[in-house]
Image: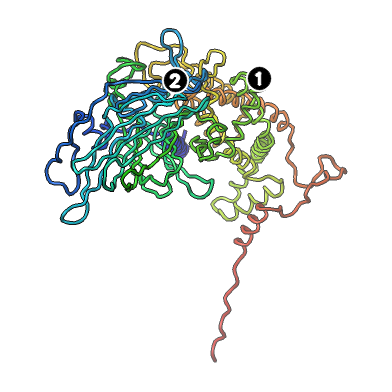
Amino acid sequence: MDKKTFAQFLIFCSAVLGAWWVASYIWFRPEPAAPRPPEAAPAVIAAAEAPEGRSPRALQGTEGPAAAVPDEPVPEPATALLDNGMIRTEWTNRGGALARLDLLDERYRAPYEVGGERPVLTLLRDFQDGLCSDVLESLTFYVADPQGGERVLEFPVGDRLYELAREPGGRLAFSTVVRDPHGHAVEVRKTVTAEPGAHHYTVDLEFRNAAEAPCKFAFALRGPAGIERESLATGNLGTRVGLSERRDSYSVKKTSTGDLSKGQRVNESADIAWAAVVNHYFVAVLNPEDAAWVNRVVSRSIIDSDLLAGRGRWPVGSIRREADRARLAAQNAAIVLHSTAQKLEPGQTLLIRYALVAAPKEPALLESYDRGFGKLIEYGILPGVSKLVVALLKAVYRVLPNYGVALILMTIIVRALLHPLTRKSQIGMAKMQKLQPMLEELQKKCGDDKQRLTQEQMELWRKYGVSPMGGCLPLLLQMPVLFALFGALRAAIELRHAGFLWVEDLSRSDTLFTFKFFLPIVQNEFNLLPLLMAVVMVVTQKSAMQASTEQARQQQKMMKFMPVIFAVFLYSMPSGLCLYILTSTLVGTFERWLVQRHTDTIELRPVGESPRKGKPTRPGTRPAGRPSGWMGRLQKMVEEQGKPGPQPRRRPKKK
């Protein structure tokens, strides 16, 4: 291999690695470089440390500690359950908080076994010890300052014990009274209703001014505080904020856990409609009925206490480097909605109504809420085409109820639709290969005259009706479809827990067994599909057309590394994606065999010349002459550049 070819090989490998890095950054965000504790709001920290009945922490414009507030009777700790057949929720009267939320559908059970069976999927819980979801974190009172302006007092209420009662219809009611040293008293009442058969519950959060003077206050409402992860890889885990752009139109602001490791993120847009915490296949959305009260949304990281302590799914020894455990544990997120300032007259009540939606990323289900939730499903750079691919996969599944078989058949259908482009590409490459000896003769004939060589090449291509882009352009046209397929297979929740042959879950790698030690790249897993894919690629390369030029042979040598590169990159990828690439490679090998049967009989002849003497040309064959389209324009441009320019006129000499 000469220096030029070796340099081309290095550039090619660098381009492949660069493209993979970009794709990994977009679709699989890198883990944060170092662990970082969650940036909890000061009110939450104070609530966790201050016993019930202590005075609040004073903020902005206060001097010294706030005066003590008379103690209220403290209720006993209590819990309650709500079950609507689709979701089961467990509530605690400490903060009136959601302690646990389970999805009861059999399809969504957890991807691991406990006691020989897969438990129901617990989507929400107190991932960070003591930090539950759906909690009123704090009340902030605005108090007139004798020197002018306002003083601000923030009262942590997230750890307060509420009165808990079960009302008719199965509703749960939490109530408490929050007082400040200046005579303000706000009664907080929270009523939770489970909608039968729905993926959400609704909450009526009421604030009543129980004092004899007007009250100005704001509040902070914590939504989902973390979400169950599908695997140790963060994937799409992070927060999302929905913005209402215009009627029935929404956009989504995304924040990953990697971003949150650098600090909390604040969204203060006036168009905030909802906020969510998401993982790869599920969402938990706090959805206000009317979000006019929302001033800002704060996204912050939290720590998964079980993961940090080695409890549950990832015990000590299950992570390759135990030193990474703290970093991985810090990769979860919570959202807090902060309100605008509210004013209540004595006895007046403010009602805030919202729903907490806990659902899989199923398009029909999310779009049924008519709030732009469908945009929480991330299809990649071509969402429209990816949706068509998912629809095709579902259609095939209805005929053949196995997603592995459906994926194989869908791949065959897509390759069949792309076959005309593939055939044209391979025929174009075959013609260029047959034309190569003539091009080499032209190079010897023209020597260092680049302009003449270009003109001669254009004339040769025109004469035989060969396009230099005939082999590449059809392949480039297929790239959007391939990107759309990749996005569709990553987003399709239908592949989650879908089995095929030895594969237990098409959304995860097809691990046959694990080692008791860790190795580079493969970790401690033996995955078969990536290895089969590499073997098929090697066999395909062996059956490819033999190169006729030294340059083409060098390129084929470089391509021999591709099976290894693909096997490394895809080793830990979802097995559904590996199955698609394996099937596509096999179908491509069959296509190449069919096309080669035709290209072997191709006879290069000038355009318009009949294959046999005396026979007319085929109908529709373009006669010899300048080709149409971009080839014709390119040839004309080259010819014009080759013409000598106009000679300058000489001025006559003066006598």
Dot placed on the residue nearer the N-terminal end, 2 or 1: 2
Q: Does residue 329 appear in this view?
A: no
Q: Where residue 249 sits: x, y (%)?
A: 52, 46
Q: Residue at x 65, y 55 (%)?
A: 635
Q: Residues within 10 Å of mark 2 (few under 14, many from 20)?
A: many
Q: Quadrant where the C terminus lies?
A: bottom right
Q: Residue at x 61, y 49 (%)?
A: 445
Closest to the observer, 115 or 500: 115
Compared to 24, does 463 lie above or below?
below
Q: Residues within 10 Å of mark 1 (few under 14, many from 20)?
A: few
In the figure, is residue 42 to the left or right of 8? left
Locate residue 183: give its quadrant.
Answer: top left
Q: List the residue tagged with mark 2.
A: 121
Q: Which mark is residue 457?
A: none
Q: List the residue tagged with mark 1.
A: 400
Q: Residue furthest bottom?
A: 655
Report the Cα–Cα distance between label 2 and label 1. 27 Å
Query: What amino acid is at disc 2?
Result: Leu
